[in-house]
Amino acid sequence: MSNSSPRVVIIGAGIVGANLADELARLGWTNTLVLEQGPLTIPGGSTSHAPGLVFSSNPSKSMTEFAQYTIEKLTSLTGPGGKGSFLPVGGLEIATKPERLHDLERRAGWNRAWGVDAEVIDAEECLRRFPMLNPEMVLGGLFTPGDGLALAAQGTQLVIARAQAAGVEFRDRTVVTDIEHSGGKVSAVIAGDERFPADIVVSCAGFWGPKIGAMADTPIPLLPLAHQFAWSTEVPSLEGKNELPKGASAPILRYQDEDLYYREWGERIGIGSYAHRPMPVDLDTLPQYSPDEITDERMPSSLTFTPEDFAREWEISQEILPELAQTQIQRGFNGIFSFTPDGGSLVGQSRNVDGFFVAEAVWVTHAAGVAKAVAELIAHGHSETDLSGLDLNRFEDIQTAPEYVSETSQQNFREIYDVLHPLQPRVSPRDVRMSPFNAQQRELGAFFLEAAGWERPHWYEANAALLDELPEEWRAPERDDWANQFHSPIAAVEAWKTRTNVAMYDMTQLKRFEVKGPGAGRLLHGLTTSSMLRKPGAVSYTLLLDEAGGITSDITVAILDEETYQVGANSNIDLAYITRAAKRQTEEDPSQWVTVRETTPGTCCIGLWGPRARDVIAAVSDDDLSDEGLKYFRTKQISVAGIPVTAMRLSYVGELGWELYTSADLGHRLWDVLWEAGQEFGIIAAGREAFNSLRLEKGFRSFGTDMTSEHEPEQAGLGFAVKASKTDDFVGKAALADRAAGTTKRLTCLTLDEPSDIVLGKEPVYVADGASKDASAEANGGSEDSATRADGYVTSAAYGYTIGKAIAYAWLPNTLGVGDAVEIEYFGRRVPATVTAEPLYDPEMTRLRG
Ligand code: FAD
Ligand code: THG
């Protein structure tokens, strides 16, 4: 076996690299070499000094599952004396402020949504679980019984031993100095004067990642930051309580109101702090130790403790844990680890160099889970758990620039424990990417939020003038304070005008690229679920699948001419995927060459939608845009007041109209022309809040939120996008039938019984008693803790102005039927909702086709 699998070289034997070698071996890939610069027994990276707290609560389902897998795996890795590498002491996040206490209910909801036990407990119960806490200060806490402490160093040594036994080679004291690649493919790893041939290279170099990335032309958007950790001297009440030197029995503790966390450490308390100033680290100034000099106290990832940065934190620690006043700080260090622009990990294959993968900015908490997923990705091309939220290629180029990475990562360090609304935008940098309509949007009082670096209007204050005219039936009830953030009642006006009149939407930030060449059709035909060998003018809504039939994106493809296809996609991940496939096809058959060129930044797009869209365009274009002139889901070139425009007849808001594309330089003028022509018809500009509400009324899914690679098309309600008549092969086709037959969950449309109940997404959903649950839901929730384990979770939610109801889509057992009752848990409160037939708006499609 060991010589038949591809040659893999892993850089770094921290907890991520070691687990990856082990997980690959478990999949039968043992032709692996791990290179580590430090000594294998104590390599000296972040893992070597990690205090090992594993808190599972996380807004991401994937990250929560990775934490659960890490806990499971570490528990099974038994060291000397038969002890596992995980101490299940439980986790406790305390609140000392009412806003925090309220937010703990939301966090508990994430846990339950993802199938993990969690409970909000009162102050008394917090004190019972963690007796050192100050009773005067604690209001309550979130208790997660399955959390605890990873013995990261021990666990890493044990997986190394297991991987070695399976045939994996580890070479320590070997500094990787270069990565050999040519023609966009990796071929070897260089360490000084040694060369290690490789088919696949995986950088698991932790915060050294950017250095390794640079060797393979791959920018790694992470910033190494120092973070303080200190130990008290012995605490009287802990005497004899825990095993020495590092044992613990009380839960790991987070004091997020002050950016601090704690764990018992034998008879001492270990304290971690995010409260200090961000301390970026220049990799070229790291302490240099020879491998023989590395010890627990002395390693390259550990900088000298700066007590002045800890002074206030020490005082605060003595307030929350008063017994610490009887102790001193025994020792501390400034330990280095990775932060990223959005706080997430970096996983996946390089866009520039095939065969070069990374798995970095991964916490101990998620390490084994991420390693398993990356092993699957490498060995099978896809992973069981959705990786799109961690994908290295999710960032725009500007977001991988060191300046951007530095600023945003430092901001994430500051905000790590803040209570953040899901729509909360970054404060800085802003105005990074702006559409050509930005000036007009500002004039209309646009309220901007940021996405992928773009400034996107969420609503326009100018439309507030229409609030008085808003008919009663379009008005939404008051919402709670939380749902009221980043919301404006103006969205109701914008939805109303879109449905009854006409509105302009800025669609510029829609990721798009041109696939061009004699092989363009063949390429896309093999990658999508629809026929791409159609005549110019055709537009398709279609899916990208992985080999297991999981959805990796939903895209639109417009055939502009025989050799030019315009793809409307979801992110850079799609661009990277299709670019790689194009390169491969071109290499294999040069006569079927294809190029892929991103056109997002050089072009712009206005969605002109609403029943009067045709009146507006007729005033400025002589082209035939009647039903005959341009049918639904067709495209053609038109002229709008002399501006060359690609018009596509489709609408994510579900109304008559077109996406109108032109080059960026002409965008400003296109907006003005349409705006002026629209005045006599009462045109408005409308923003993302209305947009999101309208698309949910129409049942249009949003990739990454509503469905991911964990879902096949049928269960996601997208079976219609897989053309049954397509006899040719496409990626994922072979797996579809079996996969669909095995599903038990379905993306389900819910309406909330009370219109004033607005949920936001990621809430747990419970099937009400009496409704038909399936067997797997029983198995999941049938135990004594059934009260806290959910049957599913909300993906997207919004108030539907047209239908006068709040909407939520949720993954739920597919045995539920229309009319069945469920409950959504929103900040600890059960909100009643009902399974409803979809789409909620215009199921006959008269608006779009008419
Ligand atoms: P590392 O352990 O850093 O491994 C990378 C390896 O790559 C290193 O061994 C390094 O020597 C090697 N390497 C780098 N460059 C080269 C090269 N050129 N050639 C050869 N080898 C190379 N996480 C938690 O989940 N819970 C916690 O409580 C927690 N607390 C923390 C507290 C502190 C003070 C710090 C600093 C971090 C903490 N973390 C915690 C984060 C956690 O430690 C890291 O995220 C995790 O250990 C990263 O593992 P890794 O394998 O990616 O990186
Ligand atoms: N416009 C364009 N491309 C896109 C989007 C877009 N690509 C990414 C993302 N959005 C894709 N999402 C959708 C979702 C639904 C539809 C279009 C894009 C849509 N669906 C019709 C329906 O479900 O009734 C499809 C009908 C059909 O297949 O004929 O319109 O907004 N350019």
Image (cartoon, rainbow, N blue to C red):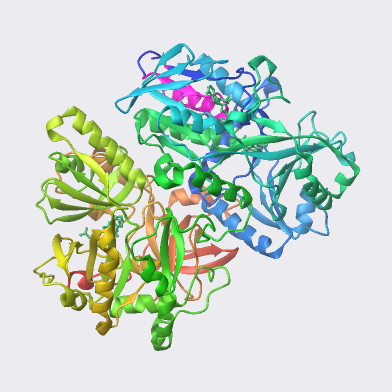
- Percent x, y for residue 43? 61, 22
Left or right, 625 with respect to 154, comes to: left
Which residue does the image show at 53% across and 14% down from the upper left? 171
Please state the horizontal and vertical placement of residue 217, each as a whole percent of the image: 40, 31
Question: Which stretch did the figure color magenta?
Answer: 6-31
Q: Residue at the spot x=38%, y=34% of the render?
A: 350
In x, y percent, where is residue 435?
Answer: 35, 61
Q: Relative to residue 726, is residue 654 depicted above or below?
A: below
| Quadrant of the rendering where the N terminus is positioned | top left
Visible residue check, residue 531: no
Between 81 and 374, the one lying in front of the other is 374
Q: Quadrant of ligand 2?
A: bottom left
Left-right relation of 20 to 440: right
Which corner quadrant of the image does residue 576 belong to?
A: top left
321 relative position to 10: left or right: right
Image spot of residue 526 (x, y percent): 20, 40
Question: 527 above or below 171?
Answer: below
Of residue 328 and residue 341, the one placed in the foreground of this image is: 341
